[in-house]
Image: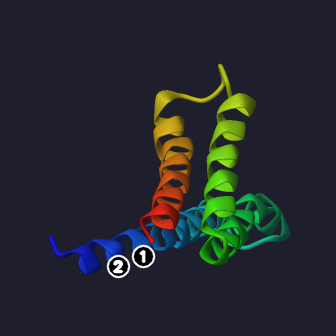
Amino acid sequence: MEESTLSKILYWLPRICGIALAAFFIVFTFLSHGISIDSLIESSVWLALLVMTIIAWKWEGVGGLIFITAGLIFIALTYNRATAAGYLAVAIPVIVTGILFIISKYRK
């Protein structure tokens, strides 16, 4: 693969992942609970993920560390309460997105 193509993929992949994760979970929350103030409050975590993506867009290193920290905080807060599927659906994609932001920063 050509170097510039790889650089473009590494630039866009974490950004798309961050937006897709936030959008998926926001839509999931509203579809599962209906449109209400409670749903908006429950979506605040996912709105924060969207804000983290915006921060990471500008400052990839800092944003990558924020993503990794958020994934680890999720694991710590849900230890012994979440299933493996919960970790695979939430924590792992967030941590991988953070790693991709850091890789993107150092590939420049």
Q: Residue at x 75, y 65 (%)?
A: 48
Q: Residue at x 69, y 60 (%)?
A: 62
Quarter of the figure with residue 42: bottom right
Quadrant in which the C terminus appears = bottom left
Which residue lies under the disc numbered 1?
Answer: 12
Q: Position of residue 78 (x, y in %)?
A: 69, 30
Which residue lies under the disc numbered 2?
Answer: 8
Label 2 near label 1: C-beta < 8 Å? yes
Q: Residue at x 74, y 58 (%)?
A: 45
Disc 1 versus disc 2: nearer the observer: 2
Crowd rating for badge 1 (residues with CA inside 10 Å; few <14, some 14–19, many 20+): some
- Disc tally is 2
Q: Nearer the viewer, residue 98 or 2?
A: 2
Q: Nearer the viewer, residue 19 or 61?
A: 61
Q: Position of residue 57 (x, y in %)?
A: 61, 76
Quadrant in which the N terminus appears = bottom left
Looking at the image, the residue that sits furthest to the top is 80
| Coloring applied to the structure | rainbow
Position of 67 compared to 13: left or right? right
Vertical placement of residue 70 versus 62, above or below: above
Amino acid under disc 2: Lys
Q: Report how far apart the C-alphas of labels 1 and 2 lie in the structure.
A: 6 Å
Position of 31 compared to 45: left or right? left
Amino acid under disc 1: Trp
Q: Residue at x 42, y 65 (%)?
A: 107
